[in-house]
Image (tube, rainbow, N blue to C red):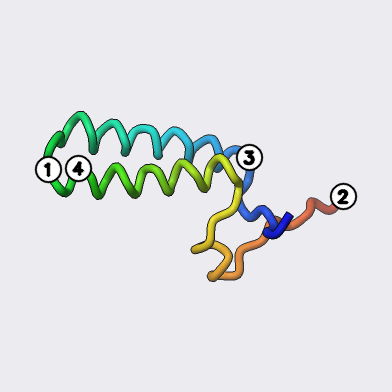
């Protein structure tokens, strides 16, 4: 892989659901409106970060997935 995952499993599901909701809201709720297309585009990016498990913004902030340590 070229990248290291920085989005947890539960967060991937949340991002995917949120992305689908944003695309639906942008294309159905605000049909024909430029803001609707912008919301849909952001929804596509959000959904892709959920599918891939990598978020460039989180990487720039230095977020990594820390392995759990046994106590």
The residue that mark 3 highlights is 9
Query: Mark 3 and mark 1: span between their CA atoms?
Result: 34 Å
Q: Going 63% across and 55% down the picture, which residue do you hit? A: 6
Distance from Cα at disc 1 to Cα at disc 2: 52 Å
Q: Residues within 10 Å of mark 3 (few under 14, many from 20)?
A: few
Whether 13 is drawn above or below 65: the answer is above
Which of these two is toward me, 1 or 12?
1
Q: Secondary structure at mark 2?
A: loop
- Residue for point 59% across, 38% down: 10
Question: Which residue in the structure is indicated by mark 4?
Answer: 36
Q: Nearer the viewer, residue 17 or 1?
A: 1
Q: Position of residue 53 (x, y in %)?
A: 60, 47
**Nearer the camera: disc 2 or disc 3:** 3
Find the distance from the CA under tag 4 to the CA under tag 1: 5 Å
Point out the frontmost of discs 2 and 4: 4
Q: Which residue is mark 2?
A: 70
* Residue at the disc numbered 1: 33
Q: Are marks 2 and 3 in contact (CB under 8 Å)?
A: no
């Amino acid at each position: 892989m070229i990248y290291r995952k920085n989005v947890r499993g539960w967060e991937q599901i949340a991002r995917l659901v949120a992305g689908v909701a944003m695309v639906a809201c942008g294309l159905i709720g605000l049909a024909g409106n430029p803001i609707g297309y912008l919301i849909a585009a952001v929804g596509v990016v959000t959904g892709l970060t959920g599918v891939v498990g990598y978020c460039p913004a989180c990487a720039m902030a230095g977020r990594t997935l820390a392995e759990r340590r046994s106590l």
